[in-house]
Image (tube, coloured by chain):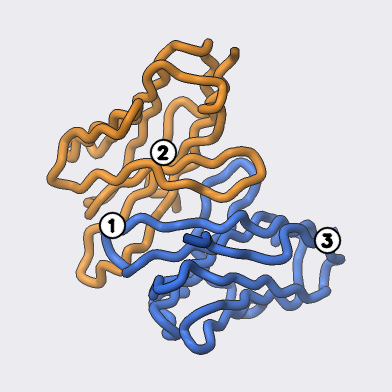
Amino acid sequence: SQQGEEDPQALSIQEGENATMNCSYKTSINNLQWYRQNSGRGLVHLILIRSNEREKHSGRLRVTLDTSKKSSSLLITASRAADTASYFCATALFGSSNTGKLIFGQGTTLQVKP
Amino acid sequence: EAGVAQSPRYKIIEKRQSVAFWCNPISGHATLYWYQQILGQGPKLLIQFQNNGVVDDSQLPKDRFSAERLKGVDSTLKIQPAKLEDSAVYLCASSLEPGAYEQYFGPGTRLTVT
């Protein structure tokens, strides 16, 4: 079963606007990661936030994590047409084996119109 | 630094035929993952290797899927016999170590079973 659920499933905005995607999960995690997938390509790692962190920034990306609500959000500021892609959250579960297994959500498809 | 290499990029086969995919991870990465991504969904882990040993294959349909990582470097995933529902993109990823680390993905192999 999917650990993460993302909202919205699809998002369409104009270039220059901000895009916010949300991810909810069910069980305790070690860390949460966000990945981007352009059409027909593999996934690219964007940012990793650990369970003891609340906010992290990387360029135009801002990620928040609320472990009490079991949710995370990804904010892309000043979006560009090149940001058009699918975005996935992935959770690394907290467990004794700590194998690094990631469970991916269904993804949010973002379209940025020029 | 060379990325994760996969081949072939595309494959079309008939049901009940067999198919094999190849992956060469980033040099020095001990952990290798095979994911299945069905259209419109997030990637699902099929099998994880640490060096040449299997760490997790709980979601690998072992009656038809097999994978090996001889010598702890490149890996092969095989399907025999293929079913229509195996149509998907098969992604290979690697990471430096298991645990709280980002994964680097290859471009994937798009399999169509007719």
Q: Chain B appears in which tint? A: blue
Residue B33 drawn at (x, y percent)? 48, 67
Residue A20 drawn at (x, y percent)? 38, 22
Residue B58 in view (yes/no): no
Is circle 3 on the same chain as circle 2?
no
Q: Which label is found at residue B12?
A: 3
Residue at (22%, 64%) from the top-left corner? Answer: A95
Q: Which residue is mark 1?
A: A93
- Type of amino acid at the residue the image marks with label 1: Leu
Q: Check the residue under mark 3 and report the chain it is in.
A: B
Q: Which label is found at residue A69?
A: none
- Type of amino acid at the residue the image marks with label 2: Glu
Residue A19 drawn at (x, y percent)? 42, 20
Q: How many angstroms separate mark 3 from mark 1 (CA)?
A: 35 Å
Q: Which residue is mark 2?
A: A5
Q: Check the residue under mark 2 and report the chain it is in.
A: A
Residue at (55%, 17%) from the top-left corner? Answer: A12
Q: Position of B45 compared to B108: left or right?
A: left
Q: Disc 2 on helix, strand or loop? A: strand
Residue at (35%, 67%) from the top-left corner? Answer: B96
Q: Which chain is orange?
A: A
Is circle 1 on the same chain as circle 2?
yes
- Type of amino acid at the residue the image marks with label 3: Ile
Mark 3 and mark 1 residues within 8 Å of each other at the beta carbon? no
Q: Check the residue under mark 1 and report the chain it is in.
A: A
